[in-house]
Amino acid sequence: MPTATESRAAVLTAVDELARLRSLEMLDVLRRGPEERFDRITRMAQQLFGVSAAAVTLVTDRVQVHKSQHGPMALGDGPREAAFCDHTIRDSAMLVVEDATEDERFATNPSVVGSPHIRFYAGQPLEGPGGHRVGALCLVDDRPRHFSEAEQGLLAELASWVQRELDRTAELDSAARVQQALLPRRVPEVAGYEVAGMCLPAGSVGGDFFDWYHAPDGQLVVTLADVMGKGLPASIIMATVRAVMRSTTRDGDPGQALTRAAATLHEDLERTGRMVTLCHARLDTVAHELHYADAGHGLMLLVRADGSAHRPQDGGLPLGVLPDQTWTEQVVQLQPGDTAIAFSDGLLDLYDGTLDSLEQIADVVRDCVDATHLVDRFTVLARRLGVRVDDVTVVAVRRTT
C-alpha cells in the first residue's frame, strides 16, 4: 500500500509526464520526417567523435523515435522502456555510459546483449516549450570508451545547436497560431451573395493574408494582400498591413483607403525593404457593384454566369514603392451567377506559374457550384501538391440572386 507521500509523488510524476508530452506535441517535429537542419548536426557529431552513430532522438509516451541519425550503426526506433534516452530525459545533466556491460542499468538491455551491441553511450537532453525534456542528442558506439570533460563540452555545444532549431520550431509554431487567429473566423452573411476564402502558407507562417468585415455603412469590405518575401519577417509585416487596412474602415472609396494606408506604412516598408501588393474592395449589395482598388496585385478574375472571363483593370504600384503614390477606385457590375475571385501568385504556381494558367483557374470557377466549393477545390489542389514554394491565398465572391 503506497504511502501518502508516494501517492502524491506518483500524481506529480503523471502530471509532469502529461506536460512533457504536450511540449513534444507542440514542437510538431515528429510528423515532418527527416530534416536537413538536424541531419547536418548528426553528421558532424558522428565525424567529430568517430562513433558508430550519432542521433537526435525524441521520446514519446511509448517509443523512442530517431528524428535524425548518421553513422554505420543503424539505430531503429523501439520501445521507450528499453531506450537509453529514456534515462537521459529524467535528468537535466548529460548521461554518459562508458561501458554499458558494467552499468547495472543497461547490462541486460536488449540493445546491449543483442544487436546493435551498444557499449558506449553519451546523451545530452533536449527541451521543448516550457523546459520539458523531450529527447536527446546522443552518441553511440559498439566499443567502450572514455569520454573526457572536453568531449562532454563539445557534445553539449552541438546539442545547443539542436536546441536552437527546436526553439525556432516552437517560435514558428506559435507565430503560425497567431497568424491563423488573424484570419477571418466566420464567413460573412451577405444577402444574395456567397463569400469564401482560404490562406495556406508555404511554411509555418507566410506573408499572404485575406480579411473581410462589415463597414459601419453595412457594406462588406474585403482585402487580399501579398507581402514580398516569406516566413516570419513577412508575417510580421503582414500583421502590420492588416491592422493599418482595418483602420481605413470608414473610407468609403477603396482608392482613398489604399492611399491613406500606404502613407502610414511607407516608412516601415522602406526601412524593412518590403513591398506589398494588395487588392481592396467594397461590395455594394444594393447596386450590386464591386468597388475596388489594386496596388500592383493584378490577380483578379471576373467569371460571368455565361462562362466568359476577364481580368478587371488593375492600377497603381505596390505599397512601399513611392511615398506619395495614390490609387483610384474601379467598379465592376455583378449579375446573378457572376463570380469575382482574387488570389495571390501562389495559386498560379499550382499550375504552370504564369498568367497562361488563368484560363485553367477560370475553368475551376465555371465548374464549381458555389463559392465554398470553389475555394475547397483550390485548397485540395494545394494540399495534394505537398511542398509549395509560395503562399496560396484565395477570396471568392459570387452573386446568387
Image (tube, grey):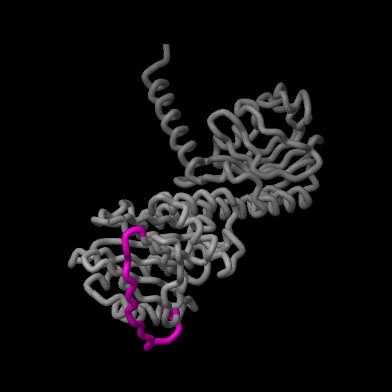
User: Can the viewer see residue 182?
Assistant: no
User: Can the viewer see residue 251?
Assistant: yes
Point out the residue furthest to the front here: 306
Give the quadrant of the C terminus.
Answer: bottom left
- Locate residue 230, reporting x and y percent: 52, 65
Is residue 326 inside the magenta stretch? yes
Q: Main secondary structure of the magenta part?
A: loop
Q: Residue at x 40, y 21 (%)?
A: 7
Q: Is residue 383 above or below residue 134?
A: below
- Locate residue 53, reporting x and y percent: 75, 42
Residue 268 in the figure: left or right of residue 257: right
Q: In this orientation, which residue lies closer to the viewer: 189 or 248?
A: 189
Tell me where the magenta segment starts and ends, as one range. Answer: 318-337
Q: Residue at x 46, y 56 (%)?
A: 366
Quadrant of res 396: bottom left
Point out the residue furthest to the bottom here: 324
Q: Is residue 375 above or below residue 315?
A: above
Point out the residue furthest to the left here: 217
Q: Residue at x 36, y 19 (%)?
A: 4
Give the quadrant of the N terminus.
Answer: top left
Is residue 348 inside the magenta stretch? no
Quadrant of res 12: top left
Q: In this orientation, which residue lies closer to the viewer: 262 or 373?
A: 373
- Locate residue 179, reporting x and y percent: 41, 57
Q: Is residue 38 above or below residue 322?
A: above
Q: Is residue 307 above or below residue 332?
A: above
Q: In this orientation, which residue lies closer to the viewer: 358 or 96?
A: 358
Residue 181 in the figure: left or right of residue 52: left
Q: Residue at x 35, y 71 (%)?
A: 280
Q: In this orientation, which residue lies closer to the viewer: 184 or 343?
A: 343
Quadrant of res 387: bottom right
- Locate residue 151, reporting x and y percent: 72, 49
